[in-house]
């Protein structure tokens, strides 16, 4: 084989190796971009998720609280009190303390139905000014208080002790709703999400191999593959 043919074969082999390297670089860049996109999606979902807030309200209405088991694992427990069983040898047992359970099932569902329209991702991603937020909270506070006051017995507030927690119930719900609306103050959450997405896209482009950005693909030139 002539030297000229050998040189040509060596050149083709080198270009083939370079081409494989660039394909691997491109594959890595695309994989990184896909991973970052998934990370962004997870972050957005976390920022607008309202399940935790609604869950805390529901546990509060049911009188439940966070405690730990013997292994240190946290869980929501129902309120109990210790009493002694009847008899001389009666042992101490835990029984449900219904006085600390603010509402019955009907009451819990009624409240969750109302506040579910306010503690919502659409609220978080909206644009409200300070005055409008205050107007919404004032109107909701009045209507919520009237609703509970007119239906407290059917909702499970059937003891004097439970009735003393009426204002606490309304305030707790309103403050949770307020925190949701504060995240939409002048479109703050939407602006933060857009800024984060743009930054990530620019960062992703900046991390791509420079060779992939500068060289144009040409089917007739293997060294551009």
Image: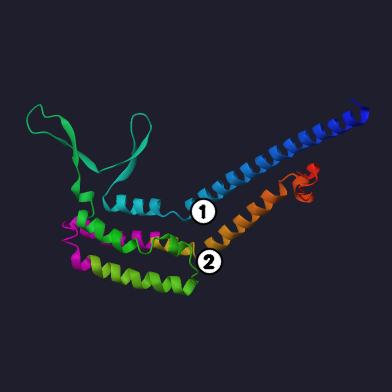
Q: Residue at x 42, y 63 (%)?
A: 178
The answer to if 68 sits in the magenta stretch is no
Q: Residue at x 7, y 28 (%)?
A: 88
Residue 145 x, y percent position in the rendering: 28, 68
Observer-nearest of 106 and 214: 214
> Counting residues from the N terminus, which is met first, the one under dot 1 or under dot 2?
1
Specify the principal SS of the magenta part: helix
For this view, does 134 lie left or right of residue 197? left
Give the farthest residue toward the right: 3
Q: Give the residue at mark 1.
A: 44
For the N terminus, the quadrant is top right
Observer-nearest of 148 and 187: 187
Q: How many numbered circles does the render carry?
A: 2
Instruction: For label 1, count other residues whose C-alpha is less than 10 Å away and answer few (under 14), some (14-19) or many (20+).
Output: some
Residue 59 x, y percent position in the rendering: 30, 49
Q: Quadrant of residue 18?
A: top right
Q: Give the residue at mark 2.
A: 187
Q: Residue at x 89, y 30 (%)?
A: 5
Above or below for 188 versus 58: below
For this view, does 164 lie left or right of residue 174? left
Q: Residue at x 79, y 50 (%)?
A: 214
Give the Cα separation between the discs numbered 1 and 2.
15 Å
For the C terminus, the quadrant is top right
The answer to if 155 sits in the magenta stretch is yes
Give the farthest residue toward the front: 1
For this view, does 149 lie left or right of residue 35? left
Q: Which residues are magenta?
A: 149-176
* Residue 104 seen anywhere in this rendered image of the structure: no
Residue 175 x, y percent position in the rendering: 39, 61
Please tell me whether mark 2 sits on a helix, a strand or a loop: loop
For this view, does 170 lie left or right of residue 213? left
């Amino acid at each position: 084989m002539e030297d000229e043919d050998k040189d040509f074969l060596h050149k083709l082999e080198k270009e083939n190796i370079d081409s494989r390297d660039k394909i691997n670089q491109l594959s890595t860049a695309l994989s990184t971009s896909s991973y970052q996109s998934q990370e962004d999606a997870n972050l957005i979902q976390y920022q607008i998720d309202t399940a935790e807030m609604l869950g805390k309200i529901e546990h509060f209405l049911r009188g439940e609280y966070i405690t730990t088991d013997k292994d240190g694992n946290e869980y929501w427990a129902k309120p109990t009190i210790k009493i002694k069983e009847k008899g001389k040898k009666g042992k101490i047992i835990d029984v449900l303390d219904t006085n600390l359970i603010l509402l019955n099932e009907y009451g819990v569902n009624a409240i969750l139905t109302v506040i579910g329209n306010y503690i919502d991702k659409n609220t978080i991603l909206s644009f409200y000014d300070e005055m409008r937020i205050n107007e919404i909270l004032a109107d909701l506070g009045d209507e919520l208080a009237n609703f509970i006051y007119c239906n407290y017995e059917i909702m499970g507030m059937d003891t004097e002790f439970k009735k003393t927690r009426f204002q606490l119930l309304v305030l707790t719900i309103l403050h949770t709703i307020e925190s949701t609306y504060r995240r939409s103050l002048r479109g703050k959450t939407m602006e933060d999400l857009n800024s984060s997405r743009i930054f990530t896209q620019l960062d992703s482009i900046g991390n791509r191999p420079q060779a992939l950005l500068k060289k144009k693909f040409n089917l007739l030139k293997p060294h551009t593959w």
